Image (tube, rainbow, N blue to C red):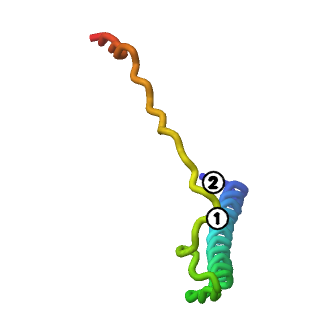
Amino acid sequence: MTDNRRAAKVRAIRWMKTALVAGSVAASLLGTRLLAERAEAETPPAVVVPAQSAQGPAWQQAPSRPALELGPVPTAAAPLRPVARSRSSR
């Protein structure tokens, strides 16, 4: 049988657990809503009109510096002898 002190303690703990769960759910929902509002405010417009240039589009212009000459790509060296397999304990 449970005495009154123990029952009151269990009720208080149960109330605190309920308040903690309800508060965390409310905080996560409000945080999600705030993040969604911030994302809407920072979203750039869907259509971006490029500025007109007298030189023409960038893909038609010559590169400003010469192309880099890259050497051959190194390959992994093969082992001198294959790795020996260990013997099974069976």
Dividing the picture into quadrants, the one containing residue 45 is bottom right
Q: Which residue is rendered at x = 37% and y = 16% of the image?
A: 83
Residue 69: percent from the left, percent from the top?
Answer: 55, 47
Name the amino acid type tagged 2: Thr
In front: mark 2 or mark 1?
1
Relative placement, left or right, of 16 versus 85 is right
Instruction: Tell me if mark 2 has few (under 14), some (14-19) or many (20+) residues whose alpha carbon lies within 10 angstroms of its own.
Output: few
Name the amino acid type tagged 1: Ser
**Residue tagged 2:** 2
Q: Which residue is rendered at x = 39% and y = 23% of the image?
A: 78
Using the image as rendered, state which of residue 9 and residue 50 is in the foreground: 50
Using the image as rendered, state which of residue 16 and residue 49 is in the foreground: 49
Dividing the picture into quadrants, the one containing residue 31 is bottom right
Relative placement, left or right, of 39 versus 72 is right
Using the image as rendered, state which of residue 17 and residue 90 is in the foreground: 90
Residue 63: percent from the left, percent from the top?
Answer: 59, 65
SS at circle 2: loop
Q: Is residue 75 above or below residue 79?
A: below
Q: Is residue 26 above or below residue 52?
A: above
Dividing the picture into quadrants, the one containing residue 10 is bottom right
Q: Which residue is rendered at x = 67% and y = 72% of the image?
A: 27
Relative placement, left or right, of 41 versus 83 is right
Q: Is residue 80 above or below residue 39?
A: above
Query: Looking at the figure, which quarter contains the C terminus?
Result: top left
**Residue tagged 1:** 64
Residue 14: percent from the left, percent from the top?
Answer: 64, 62
Instruction: Tell me if mark 1 has few (under 14), some (14-19) or many (20+) residues whose alpha carbon lies within 10 angstroms of its own.
Output: few
